[in-house]
Image (cartoon, rainbow, N blue to C red):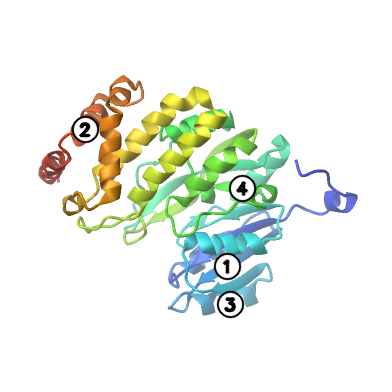
Amino acid sequence: MDGGKTLEEERRPVLISVIIPVYNVVDLLPKCVDSIRRQTYRNLEIILVDDGSTDNSGALAEKMALEDKRIRVFHKENGGSSSARNLGISKAQGDYIGFVDSDDYIEPEMYEKLLATALEENLLMVQISRDEIDEEGNRMPDVCEPPEEPVLWECEQFMRELLLHRGDCSFCTKLVHSSLLKEERFPEGELNEDFYLLVRLLPRIPAVAILPDQDYHVFYRYGSNTRTRNKDEFPQVFTDIVINADRVYEIVKKEYPDLLPEAMRFGLFQRLDYMLHIPISLMNSKNQFYCQVKEYLRRHRKDTIKSPYLTKKNKVYLLLLGTAPKFVRSAHRMLKGKQE
């Protein structure tokens, strides 16, 4: 797996590096870090990367480091979550690397379970399941359905699940061997960054184990990169998911050609998501990206009709959005308003 270990390396316990980007989360950071400090697997280093916080998050991180020698703190100018994670990767000394978002928290046995599975199955990547909690403390519907028991997916199957929107692309639910991240990094200045990196890594991994335990808890809060209550805002993520759909299509064409129908479905579905969220005010000829999406839908009408992986409703929306997008969006908004 790693080119062979020395006797000294075989004897020492495996070190896990847990990387947490920190930005203006002074109220949430203690719960997050405490959940990592309480892990039953003790041989951890906890890397807090202060991404130019303007509150007291950086100072709080330094205070935590005084309380636990496993915590290391790095400060940088604000550059986004990916740049903070990338700095953490460059500083990590662990055999395996995990990621936790600073507003989330984890169960005490999470990393012990993940590492045990990785070593037992000789895997480069293992995944735990997750749930989501909203701002009122309510459990939300599962984004990714956890398996009933541990499963081992070959990576072509994992890729297929991602293309059908059934897989979990988040790196926060994964433990990754550090060798995979020697050259690869998260894309900076983009969203949907976990998907970008994961689909680049999958061709290098024989299989991924997925554990059913929902030990990673996502705190779902509005105002983040992908969540907003303002209907006139258009988060960047809806553009980036289309860009990543084209990237993964090229990877599939090269590495998993049998999955091209699923990859086509993925590209169409991501553009459907884009078209159903873009404000009508931005649907004009000056918006080059919007025009490209509209043209793609027109060009792939036959693929839309023939796809076995799109629902009838998906197909109707895609065909109409490629023909009369503004009218469809206006009708869609009225329909949603009545339902709400």
Front position among marks 4 and 2: 2
Image: 274 above or below 135:
above
Q: Residues within 10 Å of mark 4 (few under 14, many from 20)?
A: many
Q: Tag 2 or tag 1, which sits nearer the N-term?
A: 1
Marks 1, 2: nearer the viewer: 2
- Residue ID for mark 4: 175
Residue 263 picture location, percent across and down: 43, 31
Cα distance between the residues tagged 3 and 1: 9 Å
Asked if residue 37 shows in the view, the reply is: no
Q: Where residue 181 is drawn, which disc sits there? A: none
Q: Which residue is mark 2?
A: 317
User: Which amino acid lies under the numbered mark 1 shown in the image of this protein?
Assistant: Leu
Label 1 environment density (alpha carbons within 10 Å; few <14, some 14–19, many ≥20): many
Locate residue 246: give its quadrant: top left
Query: What kind of residue is marked 3?
Result: Glu
Which residue type carries mark 4?
Answer: Leu
Q: Which amino acid is tagged 2?
A: Tyr
Q: Position of residue 37 (x, y in %)?
A: 61, 63
Q: Secondary structure at mark 2?
A: helix
- Mark 3 sits on what residue? 62
On screen, residue 340 versus residue 212, left or right, reads: left
Q: CA distance from mark 1 to mark 2?
A: 44 Å
